[in-house]
Amino acid sequence: MNSNSSNPKGRTTIEVGADGVAVITIINPPVNSLALDVLYSLKENYDQALRRDDVKAIVVTGANGKFSGGFDISAFGKLQGGTVESPKPGFISVEILTDTVEAARKPSVAAIDGLALGGGLEVAMACHARISTPNAQLGLPELQLGILPGFGGTQRLPRLVGLAKSLEMILTSKPVKGEEAVNLGLVDAVVSSNQLLETARKWALDILERRKPWVSSLHKTDKLEPLSEAREILKFARVQTRRRAPNLQHPLVVLDVVEEGIVSGPRAGLWKEAEAFQGLLHSDTCKALVNVFFAQRGTTKVPGVTDLGLKPRRIKKVAILGGGLMGSGIATALLLSNYLVILKEVNDKFLQAGLARVKANLQSSVKKGKMSQEKFEKTLSLLKGTLDYEGFRDVDMVIEAVIENVSLKQQIFADLEKYCPPHCILASNTSTIDLNLIGEKTKSQDRIIGAHFFSPAHVMPLLEIVRTHKTSPQVIVDLLDVGKKIKKTPVVVGNCTGFAVNRMFFPYTQAALLLVERGTDVYRIDRAITKFGMPMGPFRLCDLVGFGVAIATGGQFVMNFPERTYKSMLIPLMQEDKRAGETTRRGFYVYDDRRKASPDPEIKKYIEKAREMSGVTIDPKLAKLSDKDIIEMIFFPVVNEACRVLAEGIAVKASDLDISAIMGMGFPPYRGGIIFWADTLGSKYICSRLDEWSRMYGDFFKPCSYLAERASKGAPLSSTTDPAKSRL
């Protein structure tokens, strides 16, 4: 089967040199992914090389300095939906790679440059030797997509590097570089890019002449631990995996498949792998993680902005106003990507504290071994502190990160207009305040934009880019580029109270408070939500961010969405009593010296008082909710608000909200994101539950018109115009 003509992009080519070596090159830009066409073409060219008398040996390589990034992920959706015929199980792993490549009477060598990931590494492992460049990345990251290595990787990697190391590589999805791969036995030699092909050709001929060993990876046993030891390693890995990912099945399936190969032999292992791959490909986890993969890549496509052909301008110097937790975190993120940074504060005491925070952030990278002392000093030298606007005359961007106070921010933006050059981007890290209000007293509204980071800013992966109707497309394109350079996933959203993430998750805490006042136990709620996969429950989260922040952001919502706010006095009552969360060591939990949280029976009296003030009584049904009900009563209002954000055009597409929930709030990625998860349950079901609760407990639960309309048609909440979906 050869569909090369219909898809000229993905193919392999064959060239036979005078030395009798056939070089087969994988071509499928940008990363030479192994689409089905490429794999069929690889088999054809292998068969040809094996038939031809002028071919003595074979070298497999990838075009443009990249071996292969692995199986083509865009094919997953087609295979899952049945729009593309799936090759029969074992066709690639057994027929092509084992019985054609590895079993061939002519030796083959993989010449690896750039990257050999997933299926790319699996193709290389089927060859009789591997030559790599020192910085090439080699790894099997399939678990990140909810599947397992399906082209023989579960069988060959343990035989090349030993069981313990192979499990570490597969379970953590961490690649190794060429240098380390040699020491592990994964590759046979490391050479520079310009010597790669020549070395590989010579190596292939040396194997033929038996000057170098002819090794079939699948039948190597010297690296495998003895059976009893292997079983112990697998047992330990199972315990750790269950602890680390209690809701995930596929890492355990991998361990079963690896074990099968060790106990029953590699051929049996290959067939078990093929069967397991088929099963996992159609699992909810795989569909969810593939959704996340494309959603994350789709956030940088913004209709009417990124399709205008604008090039990002070069941003060299960034000023940050405010050296608190957020300002210092943002400064750290920029410094780590080599931007020059000026940190401005109002007095010397605050400035020194801000600079010290940045220094401490960088030092923790040195302590963890992620950064050398020399690099630390070089990075820190990019930072300057200041108390006035003098140094602002040549900055390309300013990010304001002061307290959430409207008049203070207005004053700052009026000052910035005076001191900064006319091309300078004026960004605010506000998490709730309307940007039109912030820029009200300026003439520069086309360059005012929100750059909302999440705390801690140098760690959290999301950057909400907030545009107003006046923000120019150029400024958005510039900030998208900065986001990418500082390794954040940027999501472009519209301007409203709370933007996308905080607004979507505002009902999260409110629903939890409503349940507690009506009899559900605080700690049961947190346990159920954590079990579902969130990093922490709503009450532990309140303690972490602090009650001051919770009340301030709450106030914004009460003011802007009064008809659907659940007003509870529980948090203000606790704060009056000097309980303000983790910083005061007492919130919903009590904290010891090591910040370990324990439940506090004292909480009951505050709940009783808040219940009295709200005029509600304990509802026996809510006092004994199942975990499933707790999850639904807390997350369905979040889904409902997400639908409003979508309907109002605050978010461009549903997949942007999926990414925002995962990266901004820690929603479990293996559930695919907030809207994706909701669609697995169905709009009809969600709407009917919300309807029922709003009749019993008020308008807080009332389904919005977007949700009600989707439910009446039984339609998914993610619109079909969603580019991330239509690409699948």
Image (cartoon, rainbow, N blue to C red):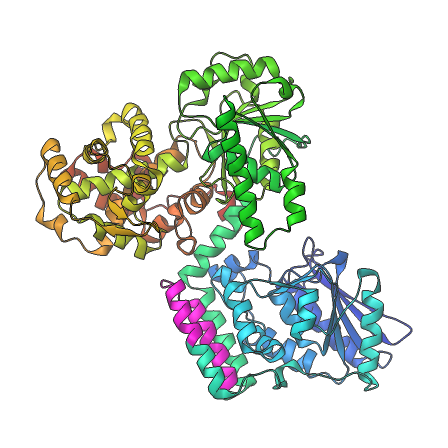
Q: Is residue 274 left or right of residue 431?
A: right
Q: Residue furthest right?
A: 18
Q: In which quarter of the view is residue 13 placed?
A: bottom right
Q: Position of residue 9 (x, y in %)?
A: 70, 55
Q: Which of 678/116 is in front?
A: 116
Q: In which quarter of the view is residue 43 placed?
A: bottom right
Q: Is 237 situated above or below 359?
A: below
Q: Position of residue 131 (x, y in %)?
A: 75, 70
Q: Is residue 484 left or right of residue 132?
A: left
Secondary structure predominantly adopted by residues drawn in magenta: helix
Q: Position of residue 271 (x, y in %)?
A: 52, 80
Q: Is residue 327 visible?
A: yes
Q: Which of 552/84 is in front?
A: 552
Q: Is residue 523 left or right of residue 489?
A: left
Give the magenta-colored segment's residue range.
Answer: 236-263
Q: Is 551 situated above or below 265?
A: above
Q: In which quarter of the view is residue 115 placed?
A: bottom right
All told, the count of numbered labels is 0
